[in-house]
Image: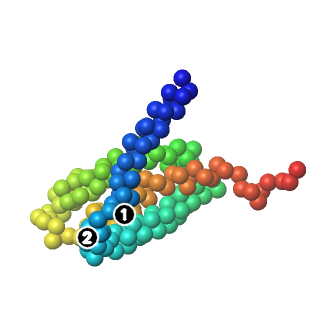
Amino acid sequence: MGRLFSRLSRVLALLLSLPLLSILASIFTDQRATWQHLIETVLGSYMFNSLGLALGVGLGVAVLGTIAAGLVTLCEFPGRKIWQWLLLLPMAAPAYILAYTYTEFLEYYGPVQSLLRRIFGWQNAQEYWFPAIRSLSGAIVLMTLVLYPYVYLWRDRPLLINRVPP
């Protein structure tokens, strides 16, 4: 039974790695024109956006998670026990579902901007300013709001400095 499971695992791993293997194989075949085109047109902006996203989300998650953990750990306030659990809610749903939900909620046709237009009598997007949610900064904010609980949960780890040597 163990050998069968091992062989099936290898076959599944090979199938799952086929897309990556095809990309690697294209480097060594006659796909130079495709790669050259990508380098000349979009690769620079893709790399810049990826680096900006990684740095922005990393910084945002570190700041938001640390502040949230510090507040519920070091401060006494009414509802603190409830907030300890509420701050974990973004982990209750997959990140891509939350990202789509936030995006649709905050888009021009979403309930937030529709309500603002109804309240203030605005007719179109040129009459008011609303941050672009489908942008690099919007992606950084949304991913930060989804991923900060991983830093927030770190508060339960004991600090190495506070350990008493045996």
Q: Is residue 123 visible?
A: yes
Q: Which residue is labeled 2 in the image?
A: 33
Q: Which residue is labeled 1 in the image?
A: 28
> Image quarter for residue 139?
bottom left
**Which residue is found at the position 34% from the left and 46% from the top?**
97
**Residue 15 locus on image (x, y percent):** 38, 42
**Residue 12 locus on image (x, y percent):** 42, 38
Please indicate whether residue 36 sits to the left or right of residue 91 in the image.
left
**Residue 28 locus on image (x, y percent):** 36, 63
**Which residue is found at the position 34% from the left and 74% from the top?**
44
Residue lying farthest right?
166
Element marked by disc 2: helix
Question: If you read the primary sequence from the N terminus, does the residue marked by circle 2 or circle 1 appear first?
Answer: 1
Type of amino acid at the residue the image marks with label 1 = Phe
Type of amino acid at the residue the image marks with label 2 = Ala
> Image quarter for residue 123?
bottom left
Please indicate whether residue 50 sits to the left or right of residue 34 in the image.
right
Other residues around mark 1 within 10 Å, as few (<14) / some (14–19) / many (≥20): few
Q: Nearer the viewer's eye, disc 2 or disc 1?
A: 1
In the picture, the quarter occupied by the N terminus is: top right
**Which residue is found at the position 39% from the left and 53% from the top?**
21
Q: CA distance from mark 2 to mark 1?
A: 12 Å
The circle drawn on residue 117 is: none
**Which residue is found at the position 56% from the left and 53% from the top?**
152
Residue 24, compared with residue 98, is above or below; it is below
Residue 154, compared with residue 32, is above or below; it is above
* The one of 29 and 37 positioned closer to us in this rendering: 29
